[in-house]
Image (cartoon, rainbow, N blue to C red):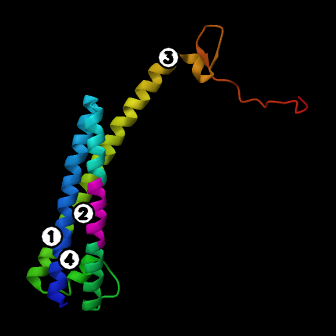
């Protein structure tokens, strides 16, 4: 495989990976919509779609890494990332490689932000539900109450146990 063929293979792999990340972001949004709507069948479907897309992202990433390592070997660049290797490629392809790499990083960041958003939404709901349940059923959390009837924090004194019992 010539160097230009390797560059084109790397460009195809990066473009495919960007498309997969964009599909993942769309699937993540449908996942969040299913959670908000409490549509459990849609949630299950969204989880399956995300799983499939995640596997395809991993496949495309492997292709991209293989093409990049081959290009690195062909250019003779021992160390460095895509920008250092791109410097050793002719100009029109160099700009395309660096542009695709920036787009790939942005797509990956969008996917990361969507995941964080879903995690924050779920954590907020979990904390709200936990607080409501603790107020409704305080005895379930083994809390101690003072004379006023309000929950108090137990002192952190040493506890002595009789091990003979």
Residue beneath the point at 30% across and 42% down? 117
Q: Of discs 1 and 3, which sits in the foreground?
A: 3
Q: Separation of disc 2 and disc 1 at Cα? A: 10 Å
Q: Is residue 107 magenta?
A: no
The secondary structure type at the circle numbered 2 is helix
Residue 69 sits in quarter:
bottom left
Label 1 vs 3, first from the N-terminus: 1
Disc 2 target residue: 105
Residue 115: where, in percent of width, then height?
Answer: 31, 47
Among numbered discs 1 and 4, the one appearing first in the sequence: 4
What secondary structure characterizes most of the magenta part? Answer: helix
Which labelled disc corresponds to residue 99? 1
* Precedes in sequence: disc 2 or disc 1: 1
Q: Is 92 rendered above or below residue 23?
A: below
Residue shown at the point (16%, 67%) measured from the top left:
15
For the residue labelled by badge 3, is the local secondary structure a helix, a strand or a loop? helix
Q: Would you call the spot at circle 1 few (<14 residues within 10 Å), some (14-19), or many (20 or more)?
A: few
Q: In this view, does 47 lie to the left or right of 161?
A: left
Task: Give the class, few, some or many, for how many residues have Cα within 10 Å of label 4's Cα (few <14, many ≥20).
Answer: many
């Amino acid at each position: 495989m010539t160097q230009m063929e390797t560059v084109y293979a790397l460009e195809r792999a990066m473009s495919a990976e960007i498309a997969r990340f964009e599909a993942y972001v769309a699937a993540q949004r449908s996942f969040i919509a299913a959670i908000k709507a409490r549509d459990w069948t849609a949630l299950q479907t969204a989880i399956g779609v995300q799983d499939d897309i995640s596997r395809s992202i991993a496949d495309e990433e492997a292709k991209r890494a293989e093409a990049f390592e081959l290009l690195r070997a062909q250019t003779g660049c021992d160390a460095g990332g895509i920008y250092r290797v791109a410097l050793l490629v002719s100009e029109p392809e160099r700009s395309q490689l660096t542009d695709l790499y920036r787009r790939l990083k942005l797509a990956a960041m969008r996917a990361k932000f969507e995941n964080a958003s879903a995690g924050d939404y779920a954590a907020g709901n979990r904390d709200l539900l936990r607080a409501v349940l603790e107020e409704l059923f305080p005895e379930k959390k083994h809390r101690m109450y003072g004379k006023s009837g309000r929950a108090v924090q137990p002192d952190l004194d040493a506890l002595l146990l009789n091990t003979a019992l």
